[in-house]
Image: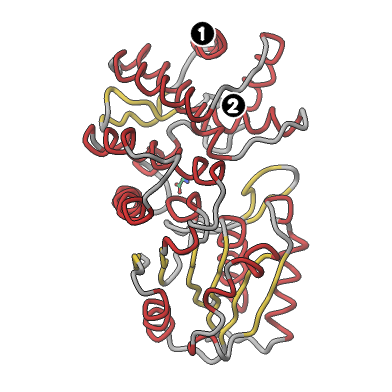
Amino acid sequence: MQDIIIADNLEQSLAEAVGKVEHDRLFVLTDTTTRELCWPVVQDYSVMKEATMITIPPTDEGKTLETLASVWTSLQQGGATRHSLMVNLGGGMVTDLGGFAASTFKRGMAYINIPTTLLSQVDASVGGKTGINFGGLKNEIGVFNCARSVILSSAFLRTLDHENLLSGYAEMLKHGLLSSKENWAELLTFDIADPDYDTLQALVAKSVAIKEQIVTEDPTEKGIRKALNFGHTAGHAIESLALKEGRTVLHGYAVAWGLLMELYLSARKCGFPAKEMHQMEAYIKEHYGKFLYECKHYDTLCDFMAHDKKNQGGNINFTLLGGIGDIRINQTATQDEIEEMLDYYRES
Ligand code: GLY
């Protein structure tokens, strides 16, 4: 399992993390955005002096086999060996693709993640899921392989706009719902519109600890790690519908809407308390607005849920909750229940 470092002093944390991995050459992977905004934060650190830079296009659309091949080529041309080290500096695209490139080059070299978005700090960079999109499907090809260290610094969060902060915050709300009323209530009262970054860093640390505990128990998602998919069966369907219709939605927004839908199913099937469901509903509507769709979209949404790679034996797999912290994995729902869920969200 990886070391997760909350960096009060980024230079020192990075030097320690790099120092812990014996290596012959050091590579740093960025995308064009993080090259411009985040690399300047670390480029003068003495530990970065010898680094060879590799830069790829930004956004999830670049998370392709072609981009991956370009990274392998750069590693080869830069003289990388199995004993080299890669530092991924960026959001989930960079840490997913960079982690996969490192895990496969010469059968695997070590890598360190420095996630620069809130979403990647609390989710993508932790837990060893690496990969690329393929054949029109997200994260279709990849391996489980943890970074040696994940370094979390609030320095990068200050560069994010409000939408990207909210996008990551949805995964934190999910972790809150999976863990305890106390953690969940703390998240609802934190002022994400005008954040105090020190408090946010502490909340990130708690959130990552929740994820880490689950991943440690079940690194390859045979059981309890499925809890982390809460909100994602419906959320991914929304994301796919949006993509199909050329509407842009950030991942975390789709997760927030998906949380709401799956809380409805949780209340309907597992007795999740109505009061807390309504509290969450008010919060999500206020901060994330609403994703609009019509009855004519139901078949498409159901189809997307049916094709989720988490499904087994032809059933749509949901993680639901009996209450905050009361996780029920491997739940299924009938077509009628799913349509009721879609009605509930549309009419709410
Ligand atoms: N993002 C869910 C997981 O890491 O399992």
Say what amino acid the circle numbered 2 marks.
Met
Residue occupying the point 57% across, 63% down = 90
Residue bearing mark 1: 340
Q: Residues within 10 Å of mark 2 (few under 14, many from 20)?
A: many
Q: Is residue 214 visible?
A: no
Q: Is residue 80 above or below residue 65?
A: below
Q: Is residue 111 above or below residue 285?
A: below
Residue occupying the point 35% across, 15% down = 267
Residue occupying the point 53% across, 39% down = 252
Question: To which quarter of the image does residue 53 belong?
Answer: bottom right
Say what amino acid the circle numbered 1 marks.
Glu
Q: Of the residues under marks 2 and 1, which one precedes in the sequence?
A: 2
Q: Position of residue 224 (x, y in %)?
A: 34, 41
Q: Position of residue 159 (x, y in %)?
A: 54, 58
Label ID, residue 305: 2
Q: Residues within 10 Å of mark 1 (few under 14, many from 20)?
A: some
